[in-house]
Amino acid sequence: MQSWRRKSLWLALLASWLLGLLGVFPLLRLAVPARPQARLPQGWPRWLDAELLQSFSQPEELPEDAPQSPKAPHSGSCSWGTCFDTSKCRGAGFKVFAYPAAGPISETQRRILASIEGSRYHTLSPAEACLHLLLSPDAPDGECSPVPPQWNGGKNHLVLRLHPASCSWNFQLGQAMVAEASPPVDTFRPGFDVALPLLPEAHPFRGGAPGQLQQHSPHPGVALLALAEERGGWRTAGTDSSACFWDGHCEQDRGPEQSHPGSTLPNATFCLIPGRRPDALRFLQTLQAGCIPVLLSPRWELPFSEVIDWTKAAIVADERLPFQVLAALQEMPPTRVLVLRQQAQFLWDTYFSSVEKVIHTTLEIIQDRILGASAHPSLLWNSPPGALLALSAFSTSPSDFPFYYLQQGSRPAGKFNALIWVKAPGQPPLKLIQAVAGSQHCAKVLVLWSSEKPPPLRWPEIAVPLIVIEGHRKVSDRFFPYSAISTDAILSLDAHSSLSTSEVDFAFVVWQSFPERMVGFLTWSHFWDEARNGWGYTAKRANEFSMVLTSAAFYHRYYHTLFTHSLPKALRTLADETPTCVDVLMNFLVAAVTKLPPIKVPYGKQHQEARSLSAPGDLGPAPEPQHADQNCMNQMAAGFGHMPLVSSRLRLDPVLFKDPVSMLRKKYRSLEKP
């Protein structure tokens, strides 16, 4: 009996196993999609936001596109290693020679040539150049310029096209690189060509309009979607819109819609951009507006895709999956929306807001290829202030730049070098040297001697090294990156400055908390002068300020490198001709990088009488800046393309300034008097 039961149990188990093998396994094969077979990689969709769209259908499950005739790529066998000779860049470094345009040129071409000539890359000698740049005509279907004498088959040449198919170079390019606006993905050569943005005709030459995003999080009254229309406007819709919003093939309710044919910038959270190349112009509009670009199967290469991580600012969606894309956008977390909008604004301001920034970014990408391992890492390209303001000549490590300390989880070292500039003849600043050297944070005292008289043979005995540097009697010499500067922090001083050791100690401690900013004692404030229709600045003591004088200020030594190698020569010459303008120029530079105001620290009343006539910003009844000084501010604002200064009302004092604590227990006794 038990044997029969045992046999029955085994038969039942065998029958259930056979049923499972024949029935359940096919169900599992239906429930779990089969793995796609190996095939050639498809040109699109190339998902920029795989985390958001990973639940969508696989490309092989979608209907095939209509067959398109293949296009022959430009010199398809060319690559960076085979068609560019880096040995020509070893002598003078990365220098660019721009061929003069043949015949009449457009306003856009004139701006391009001006941006190259005003850059640190430019050279007038073709023999010295590492890269030769040739402009393509702007006229559609125009004739290309004749091949220049130094063409050499196109080697080490860059053909610049700001407009698609401006002329036919298909059989003349040879080994030349192509920097083209919105190039097709099937002809673009990654790592060799450069993808440019499609610029409007009225795009600013320098500076550019700032991003128009006022609130990073979606506002309740702002539409969810905006669609680029063929007639030039944007059509917006609310959150209850269906996928018919952009394809128009279904009959569901579209929800509230508005058409703005005359507007240039959309006002929505997401901007849907079709994949056609003419629609690439809308891409820059969305970045400026702070609207997250949603590219519907783009058939053009994204601008500067070699260095910009577009997954942090844009979304590439498949136009064949409208319902899924719309649902994903509606359910996107606010934190993700915030990150995308912030990054879109950063990229616009840093790389796309002017013709000059677009051209300089193109040249910086090519220079990074030449440098190889010593080029900018991805973090410097995709984090503020960007690669254009993080010079690889200074360092390629983010931890060496003042604006990346927080991201790297580090802070500057606890020492500084004092740089004392001596210009006018007179007694050496012996008392100032002793006060600065008495600081516990001082590592070295550097005296920049720019006076006509020779420096004295004997100097005061101090506990730290003292080095005398011979200057060239120019005001801008004080901001040269001298090799003797060994610390991140620099205390910039004039010979007539008067500071106590406590003031120096406290100011340095404040700077350690704000290493990307300038921390100073004496302030100026800029304002808009309606009578003169221009900018002006005043030395009057007020609650608001926007500049600190470099006659007594802490800042990071990187700004010496940026001042010398990044600023146009015309601005440095202007500062040399008008000495008080050098303070304005240095404050312009730091504010343009950080987009933050400087920080003021207390300055003792006992120093009011130690005011110099050459520094109208010292405390006391100082005279107002003269007309020539006011003009230099307007010239510098024109050189930067905008007014970078930011006003502030913040002054940092010692914590125990007003507390009833015994003076013997206070750290900064001379500053913490009630």
Image: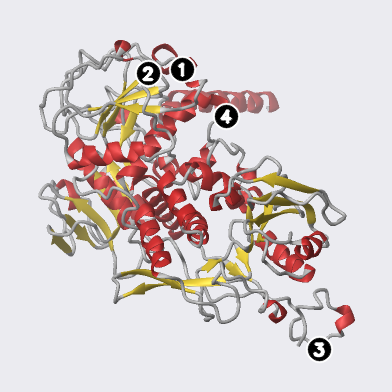
Residue at 44% across, 39% down: 309
Element type at marker 3? Answer: loop
Query: Mark 2 or mark 4, which has the lower sequence index?
Result: 2
Residue at 55% across, 50% down: 474
Q: Is residue 410 visible?
A: no
Q: Position of residue 121 (x, y in %)?
A: 42, 33
Q: Disc 2 and disc 4: Cα gap in Å?
A: 20 Å
Judged by depth in the image, the label closer to the viewer, 1 or 2, is 1
Q: Nearer the viewer, residue 347 or 403?
A: 403
Per the image, the residue denoted by label 2 is: 156
CB under 8 Å between callouts 1 and 3?
Answer: no
Query: Mark 1 or mark 3, which has the lower sequence index?
Result: 1
Element type at marker 4? Answer: helix
State left or right for residue 655 relative to residue 371. Answer: right
Mark number displayed over residue 353:
none
Seen in the picture, residue 266 relative to 16 is either above or below; the reply is below
Q: Disc 1 and disc 2: Cα gap in Å?
A: 9 Å
Judged by depth in the image, the label closer to the viewer, 2 or 3, is 2
Per the image, the residue denoted by label 4 is: 374
Element type at marker 2? Answer: loop
Q: Amino acid at mark 3?
A: Pro
Seen in the picture, residue 643 relative to 557 is either above or below; the reply is below
Seen in the picture, residue 665 relative to 419 is either above or below; the reply is below
Per the image, the residue denoted by label 3 is: 660
Q: Amino acid at mark 1?
A: Lys
Q: Position of residue 367 (x, y in %)?
A: 46, 29
**Quadrant of the snapshot with the N terminus:** top right
